[in-house]
Image: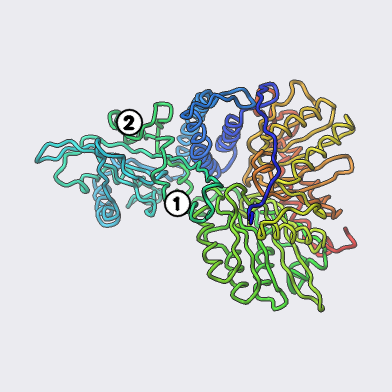
Amino acid sequence: MNTTIRKPKTGSTTFSDPQKFINRELSWLNFNARVLEEAARPGKPLLDRLKFIAIFSSNLDEFFMVRVAGLCKLVQAGVQKRDPAGYTPAEQLTLIRKKISGLLKKQYQLLREILAEFEQKQLKISAFADLSEKKQQKLRKFFTGNILPALTPLAIDRNKPFPLINPGTLQLAISFNLRKSGRKMTASVEVPEFLDRFIPVPGGGKEKNFILLEDLISENISMLFPGCSIKAKQIFRVTRDMDYHIDPDESEDLLHAMLDKLSRRTSRAPVRVEFSSRISNNSLQKFLAKSLELTDDLCYSLPGALNLKQFTALLPPDTLPGTEELPWPPVTPEIFNHSDNVFEAIDKAKNILLIHPYHSFDPLLRMLEEAANDPDVLAIKQTLYRVSGNSPVVKALQKAAENGKQVTTVVELKARFDESNNIAWAELLDLSGAHVVYSEAELKIHCKTLLIIRRENGRLRRYVHFGTGNYNDRTARQYSDLSLLSNDQKLADDAAKLFNLLSGKTEPPEKWEAIYVSPFDLRRKLSALIEKETALGPKGRIIAKMNSFSDPELIRQIHSAAAAGVKIDLIVRGICCLRPPENCKNLRIISIIDRYLEHARIFCFGAEKRLYCASADWMPRNLDRRIEVMFPVTDRQIAGNIMQILEFQINDRQQGWLLNNSGNYVKDETADTKTSRSQRKIYDMVCQFQKINDFSPENK
């Protein structure tokens, strides 16, 4: 029996047209450049500027692990095919190196400026050599008792493979001689991540003084090598390839295939090595690069500390008042406070919109926790793509299964960088008695859908949640997303069909009642919606908000719509491969970078404002290789609120950037920026919508 979900075949674009397309990798680097610009923004609190330095580094790590790794494999395989922007893989790597080198230079310049400003506020990172002898002695004593026992040297033998060091961790390479034999040796010592990176310097008085953990280790490393003469030291960090592929024809058991891939993380090919100039030696750098089999273009010498994504740990909260923007406490719609349970709240309102993180994630958690303990709830079905490390969502599902509910969870094992987490939760859910359905090697389950079946007055009622984000209580405080809670039976019918498709591995239904699902009919629907507006010419209207836009077919269609005079606003946070036509006044592409990560996908078509939300970006992988859902917004009040969000963002001159024909992003200097910050406007709007009557049916 065929147990694989069959998806339609889709065409692929093989041509290149630099007049219409921007290279995907360069577009992503331009996005990360906009992130870095937040660290340079005048007037932004110091700690917030430091956070954007850290986010830039974290983003860059993932870029090397996936995108650069993939390009390296194409080059090694001799692939010469050009991308839609006209570049071969080798040419892309050359351009990437040039772009990243400039960004890193700017990052470290900004870091020096930020740390200098922290010094004016009596917070300083010192070098060991700059401390008094008394302070050095106290730190040596601290090192002996609290750090030395945690260190493990790994010999690097020229005649043996490079030791399996953990990717992404700081390492200290040491060149030394054995005093008795005179033999020359090299070893690596990992800087333990379970220890604090920032060590307080004793006796600082009012000044908050720290020394970096790797500096303290380096200064006292001779204690780990008794009888040896230390000749040279080098701090370095290795990034490895995480762009793995699972062949659907060879992996009938996806769980074990994923476990096998994850077990080999430390042995995967290096794609970058970073060297710190703070503790450095040229001969060790050359030796390490050769041992790692990395060419010069994948080696980066950096003028300062490495692994800057850890620098957000420099300051505990409230350490230095005024260095961080005041919080925007999430609010809970009043209807939940005036209802006995979430199901009653949904029945009152029919549809409830949660705008995260301005709205609290708690109503969704409450819905699951109440369902787990409600004797009238019979079944819960949910997709899980990313959840937190100590997930209350999974705990509620476990509790529900233990209470005898029929719990079905569709778990995506291939959620990149969350694979281990998802495998662990899947196994716990299985032990609790839940039906755990794993994704397939060929298709990622990326939709965010929850269905709860409840017995009410002798009949079954269904409650549904569709979202643009993840069921992750932590990222729900950082990502801007939309959640729709509803008792609409068309949506519930479609959710039931979707779960039957995922758990039963059946054919998709001939017709969905309301939603559109990739890879079956979502691309076709989007294409038809764009074509309809194109036919209207200047009377047409398209607003689309997403994280990334790289699909060649839809890019061609948007170009055609713009040429026909359709007024188009695209709000694309990250990758945008559409190159705007020169001097085109009716097409604007906006990117917003602010305190929250813009994550919602919203699509609006026509003067009548046909509105949809989705889990999918406009990328080939989302439309052709993932299970994604686009759902309509028919509630009049909710549609109005979402349209207000789009209007705020279209007019954001403070945090918004405009993409021009050259592929660069520029600020719109034609309007007042002080009162146009869209995220602040959305938060203010949400705070005003907390009256219970806002959710009553007569207002809809």
**Where the N terminus falls, by quadrant?**
bottom right
Check disc 1: other Cα within 10 Å, few if <14, some if 14-19, many if 20+: few
Check disc 2: other Cα within 10 Å, few if <14, some if 14-19, many if 20+: few
Residue 50 visible, this angle: no
From the top left corner, tell me how far across and down residue 75 is, in percent.
Answer: 49, 28
Q: Residue at x 64, y 50 (%)?
A: 446
Residue annotated with mark 1: 260
Q: Nearer the viewer, residue 84 or 624?
A: 624
Query: Label 2 sits on what residue type?
Result: Lys
Q: Nearer the viewer, residue 377 or 697?
A: 377
Q: Residue at x 37, y 35 (%)?
A: 276
Label 2: state its secondary structure: helix
Q: Nearer the viewer, residue 310 or 38?
A: 310
From the top left corner, tell me how far across and down residue 397 is, in percent.
Answer: 61, 68
Residue annotated with mark 2: 290
Residue 540 falls in which quadrant of the image?
top right
Label 1: state its secondary structure: helix
Q: Residue at x 26, y 47 (%)?
A: 153
Query: Label 1 sits on what residue type?
Result: Asp
